[in-house]
Image (cartoon, grey):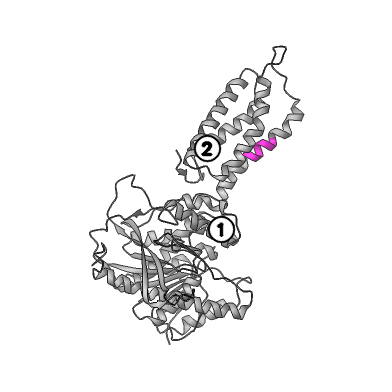
Amino acid sequence: MTEIITGLHVSLLEVLALLGAFALVAARWLPPVARPRVTIAAGAVLVLCVTVLAVVGLRWQLLPVLAGAAFALPFAVAPLLPRRTGRPARRARWWLALPGSLACAGLIASGPVAAWAFPVPVFPEPSGEFTVGTRVVQWTDPHRPETFTTDPDDRRTVVVQLWYPARKQPDGARRAQYLGRTEHEARTVSEALAGQVGLPGFLLDGVARARSRSVFDAPVEGTGGRFPVVLFSPGSGGVRTQNTAWAEDLASHGYVVAALDHPYDSAAVVLADGRTVTGETGSTGDRDEDDRLAAGWTAVRAADLGFVLGRLEGLDRGEGADPLAGRLDTGRAAVAGHSMGGAAALQAARQDRRFDAVIDLDGYPHGPASPALGRPTLALTQAITPATDPRYLPRLTEALDAATAASYRLTVPGAAHLTFMDGPLYLPPVPSIVGSLGRARSPRVVASATLAFLDATLRGRPGDLRAYGELTVHRPA
């Protein structure tokens, strides 16, 4: 009853509450014989639905619905109450009542509009043959000091979420919470993400309620051999789960995806001991200074990626008796990232020869341009417009032209910067914000394009990237 109905962006209980509220507004205009029954029935349905929703969690989008119903209620009930003469009160003139009824109806209608603009995201069903499992691990690098703190004994710690092919789960298996291991963690992260862009936290409360398509701690799939691995770094201020739809789709096709939280850079990172580390990076407004800072943050992220690949190699060798032991093909490893995470992926591939392929999801290349990229690289970009940073395309083209392996730039028609993460699933469908591909199609296009590239580079299966946009090929001299 509280499951969000795809397309409507509301649950069945919310639909019933909405209908009850509209019925209260309409009751004033019904014939006298029908008015009492409709008013009583509508009020009862509304009270029952709101009571249940208050217990399981009332969304803010229902508040204007309740306000409209509350304003309409006295006008619906008043004509039913007897006066001292024993006769029901007379209704107000229609031309006096009409503006109030329209105002109440408009207030009620704003509820579903708000639910459409800021929905509880419904994740697409992964397109591969495997069920998807997920779990979270936390690793500390004993050899790297934490540069964001002044404590000389503090060591760099990262939180990593793994998505992997899992055994088929029974129908009704509880799906993983989006944005966190628990609802409390999900709310902490969603509020931090909202605050980062200057939005009130309640606007994204639906994101904290969402569940993805994977199952926490599901047993690893027993067939399929060893799985290639894909490491992922989120955008500036982004979090490990920001590309969950993408990660789940890759995992359903036999990949293990490891996405990182970068403490002090990600908006909020909840550590195993319960502490929350919030982001400390941000723009200064000075272009040169911002470039210098971004290069430093990118270097930290690149080191995080190399460290995590080493820990995955340890998991595969059986360190810690991990269920993925013997199943990770770290000899076929790709590194990917969105925005600043894309820049970190490029740097990680330059520094670490263990990575066999690179995916940059609309990321500006920060940091040094040498050594040249020595691995196949796919850069997915939105269309270049006059509003695009004029340095972006020349810098990206320079990096791809200098590569010693075939590299590709795929311009995705209708994409915006946030098309390349989960944003289209829960943000208002404004083309300048999330692109014009639509909520359902956006994650499919990004996942399918990157899957075609990974299958070609890591599995030797030819694919056609031209099916997903305008392709520019950069071949080594």
Residue at image point 55% right, 78% down:
293
18 in relation to 80, above or below: below
Picture coordinates of residue 44, whole percent (x, y):
54, 27
Marks 1 and 2, the one that precedes in the sequence: 2
Which residue does the numbered mark 2 point to in the structure image? 15
Q: In the rendered view, does 366 fall on the left or right side of 257?
A: right
Few, some or many C-alpha atoms within 10 Å of disc 2 (few <14, some 14-19, many ≥20)?
Answer: some
Is residue 320 or residue 115 the one in the foreground? Answer: 320
List x then y, in percent, for residue 340: 50, 72
- Does dot 1 land on a helix, a strand or a loop? helix
Q: Quadrant of residue 146?
A: bottom left
Quarter of the image where one finds residue 336:
bottom left
Query: In the displayed structure, does residue 64 sit left or right of residue 275?
Result: right
User: Which residue is identified by label 1?
Assistant: 194
Does 7 sit above or below residue 81? below
Mark 1, Cα crowd under 10 Å, few <14 / some 14-19 / many 20+, is: some
Task: Estimate the x, y position of residue 405 in percent, counting from the top left.
Answer: 39, 82
Q: Quadrant of the C terminus?
A: bottom left
Residue 18 magenta-highlighted:
no
Secondary structure under badge 2? helix
- Determine the residue positioned at 53% across, 56% down: 191
Which three-letter amino acid code belongs to the residue tagged 2? Val
Please give the range of residues in magenta: 102-108
